[in-house]
Amino acid sequence: MKKVFLSVIIGIFFFFAGILLIPGIRGTNNDLRYYQQSKNREVGGPFESSGSTSRYLLTETIAEDRRIYFSQEEAEFASPDVVGKDGKYFSIFMPGVSFVGVPFFKLGEVLGAGQIGSYLMNTLVAMINVLLIFLIVRKKSNNNWVGLFSGLVFLFGSNAFAYSFFYTQHHLSTLCLLIGIYLVTFDRNFINNLLLGAIYGYAIMIDIPNIFIMFPLLIFAFSQHFKIKKAEHSISLSLKYSFIYIAIGAIPLLAGIGLYNYSLTKNYTKLPQFIGRTETFSQEQRKAPIKTTVKEKDPFEVNTPFLTRNLLNGLYILLISDERGWLVYSPILFIGFLGVIAGLKKKHSSGFIQTLFSIFIVNLLLYAMFGDPWGGWSFGPRYMIPAAAVMSVLIGYATFHYRKNILYVLFVVTLIAYSSYINTLGAITTTEVPPKQEAAYLTSHIPYTYKYNLSLLKENKIRSFFYTSSLVTVISAFDFFIIYWSVILMLLSFSFSLAIIHEKDKET
Amino acid sequence: MSIKFNEKLISNIKEKINKHGLFLVFIALLFVSIYHFIFFYLNGLGLAYNDARSHLDIGRRVVEGLKPGLAQLGSVWLPLPHLLMIPTIWNDFMWHSGLSGALQSMLSFIATGLLIYVYLEKIKVGFLGKVTGVLIFASNINILYLQSTAMTELLLIATMMAGCYYLLLWFEDKQIIDIVKASFWIMLSSLIRYDGWFLFLLVSILVTSYSLFKYDRKRAEGMFILFCTLGGLGIFLWLLWNALIFKDPLYFAFGPYSAHTQQSQLSEAGVLATKHNLFLSIKIYLYALLFNSNVYITIIGAIGAISVFINKNLKPRTKIAAIALVAPFIFNVLALYLGHSVLFVQGISGNTWFNVRYGVMLVPSLAIFIGFLVDKAKNLRWALLGTMLFVIMFSFISYDAVTIDDGRVGSSQKNVSEVSSWLNKNTKDKEGFILISAASHDAVIFSSGLPMKRFIHEGTGKYWESATATPDHWARWIVMRTNDDNDQTFKLVKKTLGFKYYHKVASYPFADVYEIDESKLKKLITKPILPRQK
């Protein structure tokens, strides 16, 4: 009976969290179909970023016409994230997000709102990510409330919140990562190995860097197939063959990627990204003679977007800077380091903690080495959303171990209040904040930090369908934001209170 | 599937690995060293550095030229690297391939790797930690590049590392022979670069203060004298050399070709921003360190350093010995602050690289600290190892090495191929000397492929004096930067009457080439007719 009651309460929390996502859904003119029909790319709308438009367009063309190529008009809409080759245009991105969005688009089309349907996929995935974090932390700590708090920290305390309403790869990548993490908390057998492999393959189909980000998970899973037993005068090493199913699970998805590549680039291993973006679509440009300038190829020219030399600047941008740093956008996530310390104290969990820590480091280093750690125009460090999920799990460890420490409690409360404030700003305004170096050259001044979101708020420029359809004449956007944030903060505080009050359960 | 191992077999394997670990590391380092030399030789980067060509030329001038002899070792640059080239540089291939100089870098690379291994072994780090330390060092692309060149960094690193290792042994075991060995290696380092002089100073302070604290004043005095007698011998000999050859014991420090003079010019031009600016000196050197050692590796190394100094199981004397490992950092910051050194980091201090390789000096120290950390942080070691390997993998994929950039496109390179090609093509099969300033155009001399005895330069004694007074009697060609008084040839020749008999035959960014008029060819001296000079 107690378990049922508990499940209901937790369910209510999840339901409430889901309800709290509704105000972030984009819409205007009292019409949820407005953006789909107008293809308006205004700031605050669902098509403000080409990272969303290009992926969405692929979903739309597949769902409506079963094609993966764009017309010229569609290519212009999806630009600059579009490739032109042999007179054809297609999305530069990996197709994983677009493929999965098709059934959601079709569902939405039942009500004539395919765009809303497909975008809601990401919102739903965001909630599933919260659930997965809850499940992982609960499995490790045997504490529901710590798990719940961890999940909510991820959703509302990081820029995962803002990206729940856009059609990007971040939440789906995080989903794959969290499913993988959850799978490795179980004993290895051929079913969960198969699933792990399939998830890994699908993660690559969503975004290529997932190859590296999820790799520590594969290493950990592989290590779980070994067992060392000490006997009186001997040591036996046993190996389970079921690790092969990880590869078997991945193969079909990898084959799918190859086929997709081939259909576009006529090469199984050549990604659209390797061809590069096309920026001009006019007939005149296409007819113009191709200028050939023989450029002497530098034999030592580096052909990778990841340079170790970028690390210093990249680490600064992603962790500390006011442009995108966690220190400014989601300082609560640094509590995860305390979770690493707490988790490593127990020998039986050190492998799992090391894996989580490695995933975080790989995600961080990969994008710190990337030529564009800012993620272009974005809100917070969007490439670090998978790392944010991992840190949220580690926050669960930290909360479980230090919850009776008053300093810890005060610290967390302060950080979660601030982090949720900043990220709620992003969730209802825009994710298109320019990097500092680009903001400096804009003809009209746009701040390069969350101050831009604040300024949009004060100018009443938000595109929340909930606000624009029912509250715009009643309260100002800023007041709406304050109420919205307060409710989120209450939810977070309440879950944190339950996490720290609840009796310490046996840790697994 | 299950396999059983006999416990005795496992302990035998462990014993064999411990016994032969050093040998296995040696073999691995040997292959890595040879492979990378061949790699950089074939792509031409092995001789990209202007300084590398100069070092090779200095070594060559000792054995071949118009005035061969030890006096060609010159001043400013310390002599040991050039002395070590003498057995091999007489051979044209060894000279022009750079192998004569690279050989000592390669051997130093292997030696440093082994020293890192034994240093970690001495502080009781397990096999994994030792191998990690060696791996961190041996997988650094900047190290791998420099060990393939005739630059002096690896030789300096090896001798300094040897000095630090024997210093550790002395602190641990108190054997006099170890302090003697330490002083020997530090003495050698003081004959390679001035970093060794600072290490000598630092270690003498460490040894003396420790002896004073641990024993008494007499003992401290004795240790000081023992250490400094051999350790300071190199410095003493160098001062003596400068006094005897150049009539000024501090000629190397303040002479016309010294770093001080070079830096003074830069300071007057307003580009020596680090002089008397401690914050900027630290910042610039830190950047050089981070770019050479990789930011993530440096951060882990810094954490490792902290773990060494706070570890309760390490004795205080071991930690004191470890202080010597950070000597390069202190020296380089000090040198920048005092204006005796210049270092440009692209984007931070100007738009080019220069001497950024100085940041590589701390790589072995970081390797030791990381090896120690990996050994002690048992619960995090696999995550540390895995993530470091991840970053190292990307450094190889992108071949991201600032030392290569400095040598390729930075201020440490000089693309003198146009001038040297002209010389090779137009003078090789003709008789006659080429008058040229080695101080300004050593790279041209090297790259021309011509024997040293074709060149009249500052080190040729009376040939130089005569040719710069009456060039029309001695030089068929003159290579110089016209209108640049920093070029000694131009500075002296422009005033001579004989210069009017020369016409410019080629003009390039680095130098112009003048050839004597045909009418003057008959009276031109084309053979080395002067008696052997002392």
Image: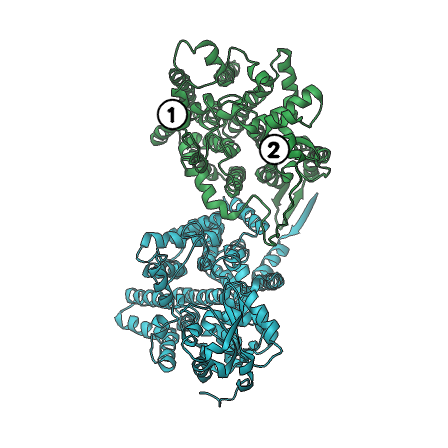
Judging depth in this view, the residue of A407 and A307 nearest the camera is A307
- The picture places residue A276, in percent across and down from the top left corner, at 62, 38
Q: Quadrant of residue A203?
A: top right
- The picture places residue A451, in percent across and down from the top left corner, at 39, 28
Q: Chain of mark 1?
A: A
Q: Residue furthest left?
A: B217
Q: Residue at x 47, y 50 (%)?
A: B376
Mark 2 or 1, nearer chain start = 2
The residue that disc 1 covers is: A417
Judging depth in this view, the residue of A10 and B232 nearest the camera is B232
Judging depth in this view, the residue of B33 and B194 nearest the camera is B194
Q: Type of residue at label 2?
A: Thr
Q: Which chain is cyan?
A: B
Helix, strand or loop at mark 2 = loop
Q: Chain of mark 2?
A: A
Q: Is residue B79 shown above or below A138?
A: below
- The picture places residue B317, in percent across and down from the top left corner, at 36, 61
Helix, strand or loop at mark 1 = helix
- CA distance for labels 2 and 1: 45 Å
Residue B330 seen anywhere in this rendered image of the structure:
yes
| Colour treatment of the image | by chain
Q: Is residue A255 shown above or below A135?
A: below
**Can you tell which of label 2 and label 1 is closer to the viewer?**
2
The residue that disc 2 covers is: A280
Q: Which chain is green?
A: A
Q: Is residue B528 left or right of residue A335?
A: right
Give the crowd class for mark 2: few <14, some 14-19, many >=20 residues within 10 Å. some
Same chain, labels 2 and 1: yes
- The picture places residue B170, in percent across and down from the top left corner, at 40, 67
Q: Residue at x 56, y 46 (%)?
A: B390
